[in-house]
Image: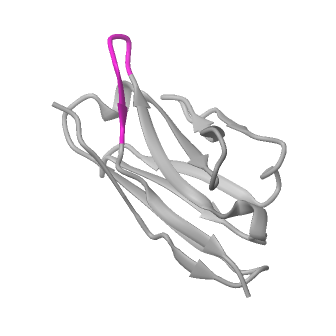
Amino acid sequence: QVQLVESGGGLVQPGGSLRLSCTASGSIFSRSAMAWYRQPPGKERELVASISTFGSTMYADSVKGRFTISRDNAMKMLYLQMNGLKPEDTAVYYCKLTDILSQYWGQGTQVTVSS
């Protein structure tokens, strides 16, 4: 059984930084692709960044150069370092684990960027 728990969200001023963390349980983390998604108020959930089992990364155009995704397989942790935050980054952020059989989602953490 896989469980994902996000943390690190909160209220931050424009231009500020936050680091989101996702803690995974279970034994498949190291062989699974991981990703961060977000769902802004009233909008569809969207992909923010992803990282493969080998560490290859991909970013949405809207966050390139500002966000960095990383993983620690030994600790079963996924991270999202967010710098230069903008009001349009306000959303609930979710981590997702994908293996060959299933997908798993966390419960989400709220990020609000406002002055």
Query: Does residue 102 show up magenta in the picture?
Result: yes
Position of 33 relative to 112 (above/below): above
Query: Does residue 98 show up magenta in the picture?
Result: no
Q: Measuring from the top left, give residue 83's x and y in whole percent.
A: 72, 70
Position of 66 relative to 114 (above/below): above
- The count of marks equals 0
Q: Which residues are magenta?
A: 99-105
Q: Residue at x 45, y 44 (%)?
A: 95
Residue 109 in the figure: left or right of residue 65 = left
Q: Measuring from the top left, give residue 48's x and y in whole percent.
A: 66, 44
> 91 and 48: which one is in front?
91
Residue 73 in the figure: left or right of residue 83 = left
Position of 115 relative to 9 (above/below): below
> 97 and 92: which one is in front?
92
Residue 101 in the figure: left or right of residue 12 = left
Q: Residue at x 79, y 79 (%)?
A: 15
Q: Measuring from the top left, give residue 64's x and y in whole percent.
A: 81, 50
Residue 35 in the figure: left or right of residue 113 = left
